[in-house]
Image (cartoon, rainbow, N blue to C red):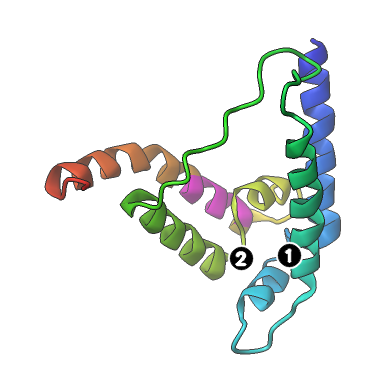
Amino acid sequence: MQRLILAFIAGGLFGSGLFVSGMTDTTKVQGWLDVFGNWDPTLAFVMGGAIIPMAIAWAFTKGRKPLVGGDFPAPPEPKLGRNLVVGSVLFGMGWGLAGLCPGPAVASLSYGGWPHWVFFAAMLAGMFAAPAVRARVDRAVPAE
């Protein structure tokens, strides 16, 4: 139960931070991604304000256990391959077109209206379809 309560608090804090920072405002996100047009650099400070403290927090996890049990995940293998490149390109295209990525999409469901629900449904459909599409691509063009 303690784990669920902490997850609820952390999720609420995360969603509130996304809202307050402007990450759920699709026009602000698209303005940040429009580096060759009417660029809005303010979200760069939001990103830095998230990445820097998290990097410091991860440095303190070595040799420690989470408060509510389990283990911290191992760092991912730093391997640049087809799956990472294709996934990054697709993620970036979706983020640029819609102005939302998964976290802000969930955070905006309560106030964003039907377009946010449509995006969320499409995002879930893509997540469920991704393993089948990946298996088909891997059969057609094996990874090296």
Residue 119 among those drawn in magenta: yes
Q: Earlier in the sequence, mark 2 or mark 1?
A: 1
**Is 62 left, or right, of 83 in this rendering?**
right
Q: Position of residue 18 (x, y in %)?
A: 78, 53
The three-letter amino acid code for the residue at tag 2 is Gly
Q: Which residues are magenta?
A: 116-123
Please give the name of the residue rendered at 66% of the width and 18% of the height, measured from the top-left corner: 71
Q: Secondary structure at mark 1?
A: loop
The three-letter amino acid code for the residue at tag 1 is Asp
Assess disc 2: are there few (<14), some (14-19) or many (≥20) residues with their C-alpha within 10 Å of its C-alpha. many
Q: Quadrant of residue 22?
A: bottom right
66 up-or-down from 120: above or below: above
Tell me the number on the disc at residue 51: none
- Closer-to-camera residue (108/5): 5
Magenta part, dominant SS? helix
Please give the name of the residue rendered at 74% of the width and 18% of the height, measured from the top-left corner: 65
95 up-or-down from 7: above or below: below
The residue labelled by disc 1 is: 25
Q: Position of residue 24 (x, y in %)?
A: 73, 58
Q: Secondary structure at mark 2?
A: loop
The residue labelled by disc 2 is: 99
Is the Cβ of the residue at disc 2 closer than 8 Å to that at disc 1?
yes
